[in-house]
Amino acid sequence: MEFSFSSSASKIAHSTAFTSLESGDVLMIGVACLLVYLAIWKKFEPLLLLPMGFGCLLANVPMSMMASTDSGGLLNFFYQGIKHEVLPPIIFMGVGALTDFGPLLANPTTLLLGAAAQIGVYMTLIGAVFLGFNMQEASAIGIIGGADGPTSIFLASKLAPHLLAPIAVAAYSYMSLVPLIQPPIMRLLTTEKERKIKMEQLKPISQTVKIIFPVAVTIVCCLMLPGVTPLLGMFMLGNMFRESGVTARLHETAETHLINIVTIFLALAVGSSMTADSFLRLETLKIIVLGLLAFSFATAGGVIFGRIMCKVSGGKVNPLIGSAGVSAVPMAARVSQKVGSEEDSSNFLLMHAMGPNVAGVIGSAVAAGVFLSLFGDAGSSIDTHAALAPVIGNPEPGMQAIATVVEAIKQ
Amino acid sequence: MEASVSAAVSVSLLAMSVIFTVLTILIFTIKVLVKLTPYEAPPAPPARKASASNPSGQDDQVAAITASLAGHMGKRPDEFRIVNIQSR
């Protein structure tokens, strides 16, 4: 091969990504840098937004083969974990291992606050339909109001995969803004007297109840809404690791290393789906606005139902704990504590708010299950071989592979 | 799938009803569970005998206060000795 300095230099110059760089890529690199900035300097959900932003950066470097749609690329491989519902349920297992259901079991009526806060999901659904989205897209957008990242990603990947990136970004961005979004709504909807209500100390719960509860939830919810079994089942499995007392190593792994590793894969995969084609659209702006509405309505729904419970219980329930029904564990519970202690510094609402907070996780998973039952493709069973084909090549190895080996030995 | 606002409202009402139903079933399940297996406080640990070096059983308090004071004064814990703790 003849070497010519000028032709080689020209070849290198033409092989750089600069030649393929388009305005959309530049804009998305700017968006990626913004996410990284928000994560590092503004501390907005840094564990998610940092790898997500960096995944976005990698995906928008032309010719890098790092976008989720680049078959054979590294992040395309990670993206299969979202596409085939692997990563969000594993995250949920870690969340389950981190969750103490004690406050919820001690005051089970707070489950209703977790249900009431789902009103945000449905107000957003109506808003999304009004703005022109179809019912499946509107459902995926509405679940942002559940304030639960893995659930949003899980549902979006099933009902509206083309909207996955903006939905994930909106969900995690607004979750980090819960301390700013919730307090004004909480103050607006409650009186000073209500905010000062001190709640009775929670009763202790036997370990047996804590062990049976995950099994009971799995049976009740998964039988009623089978579509949500991957999420809720893994959530409860993680909690069983915690409460059983005989799987300390599994519990430790699920709540630390496993959830951290899967978070990296999940966030990078979501980031890799943020290409100019999928993100720089009018729909993204609509989703960002709808996401804010979702969080606001969810907070309002929880607080208003908290007021109803306050009246019914004769003033024993502080309505501020209702806002914690939006999931976003444990940040929403901390906001209830903060707003309550601003009125009376001797009022400790944190443990009381943890009840609706974990109820919100169950509530948003149930809401996702309802959407899957209504709009999911439950009728058609997934062809496992076809689904795995892009990941591991021909997954029909069985007899065919054995026959090949036997043939080779004969020869 | 074409969607109308009225269909979205119907879906919302139906879905909220399902959520409240499922979570109400869970509330009753929890109440039954709590009733069937009430909490029993763990047995109290056996009372510790007072050590020979400190008849009043204040060894832990002395160790904690010594460590804190040593840190505060920048001295080693063996450079001074607490001989008595009096409660007001």
Image (spheres, helix red, strand yellow):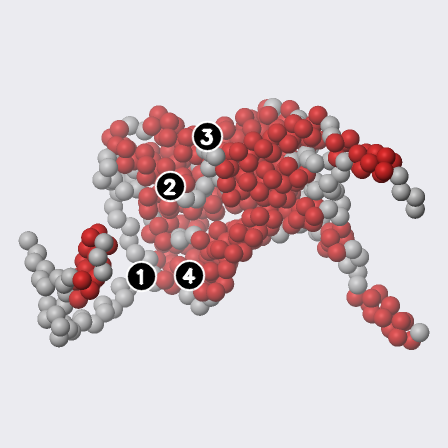
Mark carried by residue A243: 4
Q: Are marks 3 and 4 on the same chain?
A: yes
Q: Secondary structure at mark 3?
A: helix
Q: Which residue is mark 3?
A: A297
Give A63 or A397, whichever is nearer the viewer. Answer: A63
Real-space Cα separation, disc 2 to disc 4, in angstroms: 22 Å
Q: Which of the numbered marks, if any, corresponds to residue A333?
A: 2
Q: Secondary structure at mark 4?
A: helix
Q: Inspect this view and state whether residue A119 appears.
A: no
Q: Amino acid at mark 3?
A: Phe
Sooner in the amino-acid sequence: mark 2 or mark 4:
4
Q: CA distance from mark 1 to mark 4?
A: 17 Å
Distance from disc 1 to disc 3, alpha carbons, whole Å, reads 38 Å
Q: The numbered mark 3 sits on a residue in which chain? A: A
Q: Residue at x 38, y 60 (%)?
A: A209
Please state the chain letter of the residue tagged with numbered disc 4 in the rendered image.
Answer: A
Q: Residue B42, relative to residue A367: is it above or below?
A: below
Image spot of residue B60 (x, y percent): 20, 64
